[in-house]
Image (tube, rainbow, N blue to C red):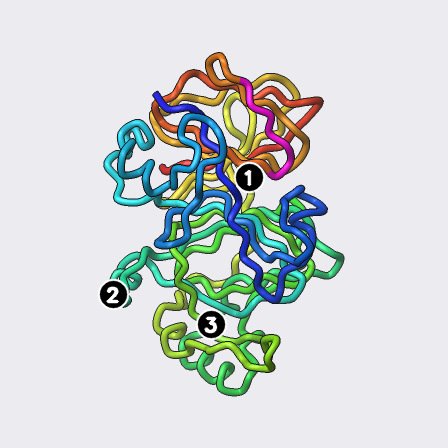
Amino acid sequence: MLPPLQFQPLFKRYLWGGRRLATVLGKPIGDESAAESWEAVDHGEDQSVVAGGPYDGWTLRKLVEEKNEELFGRHAPQEQFPLLFKYLDAQRTLSVQVHPNDAQGAKLDPPDLGKTEAWVVLAAEPGSKIYAGLNDGVDRAALAAAVEAGESDRCLHAFEAQPGDCVFISAGTVHALGAGIMIAEIQQASNTTFRLFDWNHVDKDGNSRPLHIEQSLEVSDYERGPVSPQTPEPLDGGGERLVDCDKFVLDRHALDRPTPIADEDCFKLISVISGEADLVCGSSRSPLEKGSTVLLPARREAAELHPRNAATVLEMRLP
């Protein structure tokens, strides 16, 4: 048996970040802006570190190496923790980008997983856009010509983001997150991104970031077409399924009473995106504020979430 595990957030301070990780989610980002808060990650030198409890100070990689069966249950063995969960605060439009699939990622140097991901919109300023998928009829030649002309955005399907939207970005989907949007993101444990277009952004020294046009054109999925928000599917017993793919399952639960967390012999990532709750696991009770994330190992005591008035949580696991 393993206890519930909480980690120290790992902050990424890219130029497009803002202050909402602190003001909305209560993250201790200090006086600077922050773009991302990585809540659970095991990817090379990027390692979540346990905060408190009997495994205080352990990295997620050490847990994988020494507690594999207890952590993964029916999915054991795993060489690394296969998912990465983060919060993002986009104050500027992110680059137009695309991620490889597993087979393509395996050919990289060094090899990496592919990157399929899903976004849940937490906040969006009026008019903020999400770019997801290519417009109908856009093939490699058309996309290459648009990139050459500096007009790649005209090939992209776009829609105005609304809080609560869930957008599924499978590997190969050309996409960009617009300015003014804050999201929760679950993805494969990969950090491989190919940039098609960066909106002519420059860094603090006036330099443009490198583009990866040939790699992007090679891994783009030209059959994917326009991508719209997911249609949630009601779950028996409450809650809704947002994504069910071969890389992860993403559910959302609006809680107004104590709710058991199903024991499915697999780990579960739980994150509170609104309200507050207490996690009761065996004899322990852990407060979960808005923005808090906890990893429930596969081999654990029975667990329940007790909302304080009301809370909304994301639940993420392997299929």
Report the Cα–Cα distance between label 1 and label 3. 30 Å
Circle 3 is placed at which residue position? 195
Find the magenta span and give its range.
Answer: 285-291
Residue at 55 percent of width and 18 percent of height: 285
Quarter of the image holding residue 302? top left
Residue identified by numbered label 2: 107
Label 2 crowd (10 A; few <14 / some 14-19 / many >=20): few
Q: Which amino acid type is marked by label 2?
A: Lys
Whether residue 236 appears in magenta in the rendering, the answer is no
The kind of residue tagged 1 is: Pro
Q: Residue furthest right?
A: 126
Left/right of residue 27 with respect to residue 247 in the rendered view: right
Are there few (<14), some (14-19), or many (20+) residues within 10 Å of tag 3?
many
| Residue 166 is at least partly visible in this image | no
Q: Residue at x 65, y 62 (%)?
A: 129
Rate crowding at label 1 as few (under 14), some (14 to 19) or many (20 or more) other CA atoms within 10 Å: some
Above or below residue 93? Residue 229 is: above
x, y (%) of residue 304? 52, 19
Disc 3 residue type (three-letter): Arg
Q: Residue at x 51, y 64 (%)?
A: 175
Residue 60 picture quarter: top left
Residue in the foreground of this view, choosing between 276 and 101: 276
The alpha-carbon separation of the residues under discs 1 and 2 comes to 35 Å
Q: Which residue is mark 1?
A: 232
Per the image, label 1 sits on a secondary structure element best described as: loop
